[in-house]
Amino acid sequence: MTHLRSPYSVPETLKRLESIVQGKGLKIFELLDHGGEAEKVGLKMRPTQLLLFGSPQAGTPVMLAAPTVAIDLPLKALAWEDGDGQVWLSYNSPEYLRNRHNIPEDLLKNLAGAGALLELAVRKD
């Protein structure tokens, strides 16, 4: 798993990532607010949100070649706050997914651009 330090709050980090993802023509599938859901049932949890995003055009060929990768697609970005108040943006690297699911090397390019988008989201303006 790759962890990027974010200078922004959890919601702001994912808001920035959503904007970047949509600007590249990718689809936002879901935003899960784990901390918010915990609060609804009376539990306390540090801010933790998960964004699911991607492109069916890029992801489908990967899933056709390696069907088990469907458990990890669409791509996921987890924004979370640690015990010291530091926010992180975490994701599974394309190499991790390749090794986990035996994705053919020629299809790795379909997933490779995600890391750069996440790095843009945590870049200080």
Image (cartoon, rainbow, N blue to C red):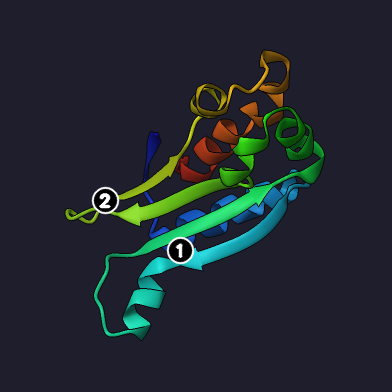
Residue at the image position 61 percent from the left and 55 percent from the top: 18
Task: From the viewer's side, name the closer residue of 58 and 122.
Answer: 58
Q: CA distance from mark 1 to mark 2?
A: 13 Å
Q: Is residue 91 visible?
A: yes
Does residue 13 appear left or right of residue 98 in this picture? left
Quick one: label 1 or label 2, which is nearer the N terminus? 1
Secondary structure under tag 2 reads loop
Cβ atoms under marks 1 and 2 closer than 8 Å: no
Q: Residue furthest left?
A: 84
Residue at image coords 45%, 63%: 11
Depicted 72 relative to depicted 32: above or below = above
Residue 19 image-quadrant placement:
bottom right
Count of marks placed on residues: 2
Q: x%, y% of residue 48?
A: 37, 61
Question: x, y (%) of residue 55?
Answer: 75, 44
Task: Describe residue 66's horizontal placement relative to residue 95 as left or right.
Answer: right
Which residue matches tag 1? 11
SS at circle 1: helix
Q: Which residue has dot 2 on it? A: 86
Mark drawn on residue 96:
none
Closer-to-camera residue (53/62): 62
Q: As drawn, which residue projects farthest toward the top?
A: 105
Residue 10: x and y in percent read 40, 59
